[in-house]
Image (cartoon, rainbow, N blue to C red):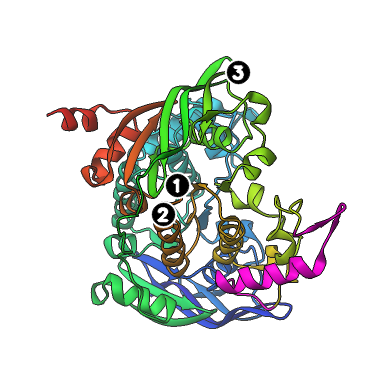
Amino acid sequence: MYAVEMRGITKRFRNVVANDNVDLVVKRGEIHSLLGENGAGKSTLMNILYGMYAPTSGEIRVQGRSVTIENPLKAIELGIAMVHQHFMLIEPMTVAENVVLGYEPKKNGCFDLKKAIADVDKLARDYGLFVDAKEKVENLSVGTKQRVEILKALYRKAEILILDEPTAVLTPQEVADLFKVLRQLKESGKTILIITHKLKETLELADTVTILRKGQVITSVPVGEMDEAKLAELMVGRIVAFDAEKAAAPGEHKVVMALRGATVVKEKRAVLENVSLEIRAGEILGIAGVEGNGQTELIDVLTGLQKLHGGAVVLEGKQLPSARLTPRAMLEAGVGHIPEDRGKRGFVGGFTIAENLILGYHRRKEFDNHGLIRIKARDAFAERVAEQYDVRMDSIRDTVGSLSGGNQQKVIIGRVFAQDPKVIIAAQPTRGVDIGAIEYIHAQLLKMREAGKAILLISADLEELTKLSDEIAVLYAGHIVDKRPAKEYDEKTLGALMTGHAQGVEEKEA
């Protein structure tokens, strides 16, 4: 008997068909990977299974029984739980309080906190999810927060667990720990569905893979019959080049931008402390670090979004006065910025593609006519950039919010690169985008490097860092704890340094 059967599932959003007559069958007790590009229909299909959307047509069977899943409460009742990419936790509350929320144990009509802690501790021990039930969620690492989400699902008696991009922000060690937990859950009889676009993780973890493209199932096969190249070709519909060629960039690689002893203090704590680094022409300097260790503040300082409390920013040999450290001044000085959170800082979802492609640069003479936008100039520029950077769209008058994640990212990258910046601050440039878009974005970054641009690359993807960077600096607790040529690192060493272990440094000195 199958744990899940989705037969003939179609989902329409007005004129868009997100799922087109999809059949998905998942065996009990297996790990099943749902693989596809952005916009392929993976998340829509799983949101239907979890009761977030109603299908336009089709049938769902759970544990052999035909069901209608009107909402997530019904899904939970049927033993289905979903761990979202952006965790649904209440930070000031404890682990135990988060796990039992909505299903609190009672004693004399009141919340029994003691029993909640005991129940969560037992559940954590039973499944190897080592979490302190009394700890506040706000004090936990990203990987531990994910464990709390899994505990929430298990506390609600979930037999079918859906995970949406579960490794997106985890270090290699956290990924290994998660995989260990998922294998243990599988051994205990749980059925696990993983939404992903990561090929290596699918091959390492899953029993079966179903590939979606443009809302349709391309194939569903045992993972043992696949390799990385086959999966990529099925996902994208063409052969994908995995190894971007990194030729030596011409020129003398002079320092274009630098930080000297940069310090930023927030809430009486130094989130960046005495950080010095140099970004050179024709090179990519990678920054490795777990989120929350100063990367955001580093990006903000270099792009004028954050004032320094000590130290200096130097551009082309000149120290920039504090008054010049503004986003507008940095853009005008030739510092391009691909933000780490495209939804918050990269675009305005309700604006058109044309409007977004000049955001931040709209005061330039080619676009500005005494405070009014030159519409013809803007649209001609937008058409050229959208074509050059392969933005998949119907029209430049489409809203950016209607595009897939990969195409939204192409709009941002096209906007920055089209202005011919001297320095590029690329923060998480491929986060949440599929392998086809990743291949394209990597090629564009290397093209800019070969054109002599100075690039700072901040990424949670260690394979991306080691592949693209010339040098990598590791940021931990607001300090640069190690820096060396990228070829001298492996993912294990980087992961150790990122989590504050001295192992990587010791290996270097040995």
- In this view, the residue in front, 65 or 357, is 357
First in sequence: mark 1 or mark 3? 3
User: Where does the N terminus fall, quadrant-wise?
Assistant: bottom left
- The residue labelled by disc 2 is 449
Question: Disc 1 and disc 3: Cα gap in Å?
Answer: 30 Å
- The residue labelled by disc 1 is 455
- The residue labelled by disc 3 is 267
Q: Which mark is residue 52?
A: none
Verify CB contact (< 8 Å) between mark 1 and mark 3: no
- Local packing at callout 1 (Cα closer than 10 Å; few below 14, some 14-19, many 20+) is many
Q: Is residue 327 above or below residue 185?
A: above
Element carrying mark 2: helix
In the image: residue 402, left or right of residue 87 = right
Verify CB contact (< 8 Å) between mark 1 and mark 2: yes
In the image: residue 366, left or right of residue 445 = right
Residue occupying the point 67% across, 73% down: 383
Q: Amino acid at mark 1?
A: Ile
Q: Which percent across, then down, holds residue 259? A: 47, 29
First in sequence: mark 3 or mark 2? 3
In the image: residue 57, left or right of residue 174 = right
Q: Which residues are magenta?
A: 366-394
Which residue appears farthest toward the left when viewing the image? 510
- In this view, the residue in front, 398 or 230, is 398
Q: Amino acid at mark 3?
A: Glu
